Image (spheres, coloured by chain):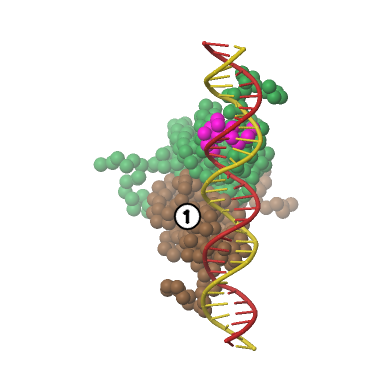
Chain colours: A brown, B green, C yellow, D red
Amino acid sequence: MRIGESPAAGGGAATAERIRDAAIVRFGRDGFSAGLRAVAADARVTAGLVVHHFGSKDGLRRACDAYVLEVIRSEKMKAVTGSASGMIAQLAEVEEYAPLALYAMRSMQSGGELATAFVEQMCRDAEQYLAAGVEAGKIKPSRDPAGRARYLTYQGMGALLLWMSLRNGSVEVEDFRTELRRLSDEITLPALELFTDGLFVDRSLLDDYLMYVCDPPAGPAQP
Amino acid sequence: MRIGESPAAGGGAATAERIRDAAIVRFGRDGFSAGLRAVAADARVTAGLVVHHFGSKDGLRRACDAYVLEVIRSEKMKAVTGSASGMIAQLAEVEEYAPLALYAMRSMQSGGELATAFVEQMCRDAEQYLAAGVEAGKIKPSRDPAGRARYLTYQGMGALLLWMSLRNGSVEVEDFRTELRRLSDEITLPALELFTDGLFVDRSLLDDYLMYVCDPPAGPAQP
DNA sequence: TCAAAGACTAAACCGCTGTTCAATCGGCGC
DNA sequence: GCGCCGATTGAACAGCGGTTTAGTCTTTGA
């Protein structure tokens, strides 16, 4: 027994969780180029023990991915406030989950299974959220609901990703939260303007496009 | 004299340009984690010569950044078709400049001076482009033109960045061009819908927000 | 013609990386 | 008590990264 831990016997499985949590924080802060020894030092163990528990660095990352995705899925993240990036912002607002949000961002920055699964789920959530809005008479219907959900998700999450990438180097969790709020304040007015009034004064561009492609690309199965 | 080169005397300065061009292609394809030896092999030189000409890997990257930014600035990239990502698409369509577009994307993915300067310039271009559209009566005016331009730029470029990040690993120039066209086809309809009709059916959300913050956050200097 | 200069190479250097290995520690069943 | 087994460590290994260095070769200039 070291200091204030080992709720289970010996602390065997608890150590693995500690390593995983430390990895999530470290990877979120410095990116996946962070070394195994840095993660191990954060968890107050050695690099050898990390590969003993997770097989390899890739195994450690897979464990982190699975955990983060599972937490995000289990939490009621469905109640996204509206914008796609609101999901990350909402997640980051909870003190405990802020590192998870940062990790998810890093995962998106470098690509991988977690990133793909993550945005895919966000697209689905956005689609059903938009459908509910349409049902309630709050949101205008679309000729291609799935495409619109995908478009909005990619735009919102991508803007957040670009904004984080431009802040090069490591990202502290505190800065992430505060600047996320500042970003939210900056984009609220343009987003609301665009969402209520649109951008074009006439519908000629849309009508021309609809005239050009007679059938909308909603579904591939269409007689 | 080696094979078919050395237009100038000895090929001293020409070799540096060849290394720089090879670095742009290699970095664009594999990201900045690509090694100096790979770049050197592409340019049919050794790693030592690269640092002899550029001082260090960072110096090489700075040279690439400066060159790419200079080309993008000198070319009439101002005539962006409309969307923010159209700039990259337009650049990639020109066979010769496709590697530059890929390099710019990689730069945005990892952050740095070039990335910041690049999106900053795009924001300015978008702002004046939108202003011209407003002047011509094609685009609705905004309460915060600069904020709207910034918002649209970040959204469009960010979506492109996210889409490229999800395609992990190396990106071939051919795939980049073809998939860029496919992406453009996918998002055209949702974008046109959003830009002409907006998203909300009523203006309550916007009005509530405008009521909440009496003065728009257009300028920080306001009595 | 000689010498200085720069392009260029091959090899080595050094630090860092992920990974492996042998050894030690500590609890648990027999 | 004894032996096993997993947790854990420290050191070592192998590879790759950027950088350095010594040396060769070519061109240039006095």
The chain letter under disc 1 is A
State whether the magenta stretch is mostly helix, strand or loop.
Answer: helix
Residue at the right extreme of this rendering: A223
Q: Where does the C terminus of chain B fall, quadrant-wise?
A: top left
Can you give x and y, in whole percent of width and height, for residue A178 in the image?
Answer: 39, 54
Residue D19: % across, % down? 52, 39
Q: Label 1 is placed on what type of residue?
A: Arg
Q: Tell me the quarter of the image containing the N terminus of chain B.
A: top right
| Percent coordinates x, y for residue B63 in the rendering | 52, 32
SS of the residue under disc 1: helix
**Residue A127 in sight:** no
Tell me what residue is drawn at x 57 percent, y 38 percent: B103
The number of numbered badges drawn on the structure is 1
Q: Is residue A150 left or right of residue B150?
A: right
Mark 1 Cα within 10 Å, few/some/many (few <14, many 20+)? Answer: many
Query: Which residue position is annotated with label 1?
Result: A29
> Is residue B144 inside the magenta stretch?
no
User: Residue D2: where, in percent of width, then height?
Assistant: 61, 84
Q: Is residue A102 left or right of residue B2?
A: left
Residue B149: name its quadrant: top left
Of residues A197 and B156, the one nearer the viewer is B156
The stretch in magenta equals B45-57
In the image, residue B49 lies in the stretch drawn in magenta: yes
Please say if B54 is above or below C16: above
Outermost residue, left side:
B223
Residue A161 can be seen, yes or no = yes
Task: Give the vertical position of B149 relative to A14 (above or below).
Answer: above
Rendered residue at 48%/65% (across/down): A44
* Residue drawn at 31 percent across, 48 percent down: B214
Judge whether B121 appears above or below B109 on screen.
above
